[in-house]
Amino acid sequence: MPKQAAKKRRPTQKPASSHLYLRLAGFLAIIVVVLAVVLVLLRPPAGTAAPGAVPVRVDMAGFEPNVLQAQVGVPVKLRLINPDSPYHTDGGGKHQFASPELGVDVVVPPESDRVVTFTPTAPGTYTFYCDVCCGGKENPTMQGTLKVTA
């Protein structure tokens, strides 16, 4: 029997490189998920983003708290927190903290917060409001007061 007839054919195999790409893609997907989890866990908890700032939540239900206290000549530092979605049709989810008497007008984008600092110069009761959505400043829930003492 001739040697040429005795040769056996090997079964065809997939190249090893295709398995390598699948493993690499899986490994990269795991890394992305782990990094996302780490970023979420490392985000500072609510209330720690602005040391010394008074947290004020402003959403479709109004301001919480809606009565604030301050003293003449002492800087007021507020952390305005807007948890509303950008898909809110009235105002696009934006809210405002405005008080013309105090010279303050800050718009807070949806799902974010802003820190505002101002110093009252005279005692009295000052109104603040949101005039961006939810019936504007005429809506009693979208108003609050700042009581300034000497």
Image (spheres, grey):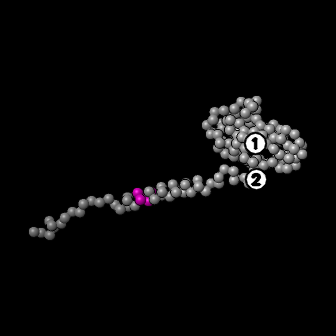
**Mark 1 burial class by Cα count in 10 Å: few <14, some 14-19, many 20+:** some
Task: Provide residue 121's location: percent of width, then percent of height.
Answer: 89, 45
Task: Name the residue type under label 2.
Answer: Gly
In front: 121, or 88? 121
State whether residue 136 is above or below residue 1.
Answer: above
Q: Quadrant of the N terminus?
A: bottom left
In front: 7, or 121? 121
Q: CA distance from mark 1 to mark 2?
A: 19 Å
Q: Quadrant of residue 103?
A: top right
Q: Which residue is mark 1?
A: 106
Q: Quadrant of the C terminus?
A: top right
Q: Main secondary structure of the magenta part?
A: helix
Task: Provide residue 32's location: percent of width, then percent of height.
Answer: 51, 56
Label of residue 37 in the image: none
Whether residue 108 is visible here, answered yes or no, is no
Q: Residue at x 55, y 54 (%)?
A: 36
Q: Is residue 82 left or right of residue 12?
A: right
Task: Name the residue type under label 1.
Answer: Val
Q: Which residue is mark 2?
A: 52
Magenta residues, as a range?
Answer: 21-25
Whether residue 55 is visible here, answered yes or no, is yes
